[in-house]
Amino acid sequence: MSLLSRCPVVPVVVLDEPDQAVPLGEALLAGGIDVVEITLRTPAGLPGIRRLSALPDLLVGAGSVLLPSQVDAAVEAGARFVVSPGVSADVLGRAAEQGVPALPGVATATDLMAVTALGLDEVKFFPAGLLGGPAAIRALAAPFRDVAFMPSGGVTAETMGEYLALPVVPAVSGSWMAEPALLRERRWDEVTTRAAAAVRR
Ligand code: 3PG
């Protein structure tokens, strides 16, 4: 199964503390979301991925992956996919060597040509809101008929449906289900509520 067809919403998470990871994962699963992207933007990212590997029903990936060495570290910690904000042939090559799916971030037709030339057909569209939202995806997708897009960056509970209405968008991603403030305040019920609302849309 393709990565993007697994779940229509991929929460993007910035962990402050590794001990937020498991209650967060359990809260997302309780809301019906079984995939999560833990960013490597904070020192808690890798240990958080390692702890989440204890939840067998949750597909855990690493986000904000900028370097091949981070692919290695993420996979070693238990990440089963990697997401990047842009296109790096080195990162994509290392992910292929490690045998994990990679979602490169694209913003232009040039990015899409680079990615499709490498044989990939699933991408993150980032930052989706600033790039023009669903209309931009509709225009960019036209010449790339086999590419599936995961918009990210500025997608909200209110706008996700407009993106998912596009046939080329099997999934969206965003941080609203797992905002840092919710994690700091350990408001796991609210995470579950937002996750459930997102999968219901
Ligand atoms: C990110 O870069 O953090 C993701 O694209 C999510 O963006 P968001 O916080 O606007 O949902």
Image (cartoon, helix red, strand yellow):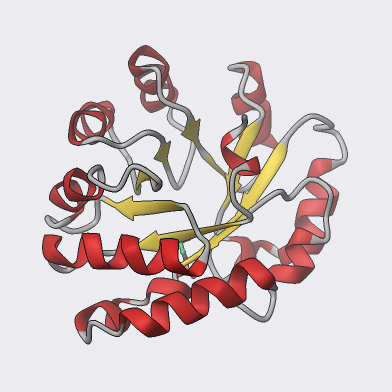
In this rendering, position of residue 196 left or right of residue 48:
right
In this rendering, position of residue 39 left or right of residue 125:
left
Residue 13 to residue 45: above or below: below
The image position of residue 127, as x and y in percent, is 55, 60
- Can I make out residue 156 in this image? no
| Residue occupying image coordinates x 43% and y 42% | 83
| Residue occupying image coordinates x 14% and y 57% | 44
In this rendering, position of residue 82 left or right of residue 170:
left
Residue 42 quadrant: bottom left
Residue 134 to residue 70: above or below: below
Residue 12 to residue 80: above or below: below
| Residue occupying image coordinates x 33% and y 63% | 26
Taking depth in this image into account, of 167 and 153 the one nearest to the observer is 167
Taking depth in this image into account, of 43 and 34 the one nearest to the observer is 34
Q: Which residue ends up furthest to the top in the rendered image?
A: 97
The image position of residue 52, as x and y in percent, is 25, 50
Taking depth in this image into account, of 135 and 149 the one nearest to the observer is 149
Q: Quadrant of the N terminus?
A: top right
| Residue occupying image coordinates x 41% and y 35% | 81
Q: How many marks?
A: 0
Residue 74 quadrant: top left
Taking depth in this image into account, of 58 and 145 the one nearest to the observer is 58
Residue 185 to residue 2: above or below: below
- Can I make out residue 11 in this image? yes
The image position of residue 170, as x and y in percent, is 71, 48
The image position of residue 201, as x and y in percent, is 70, 73
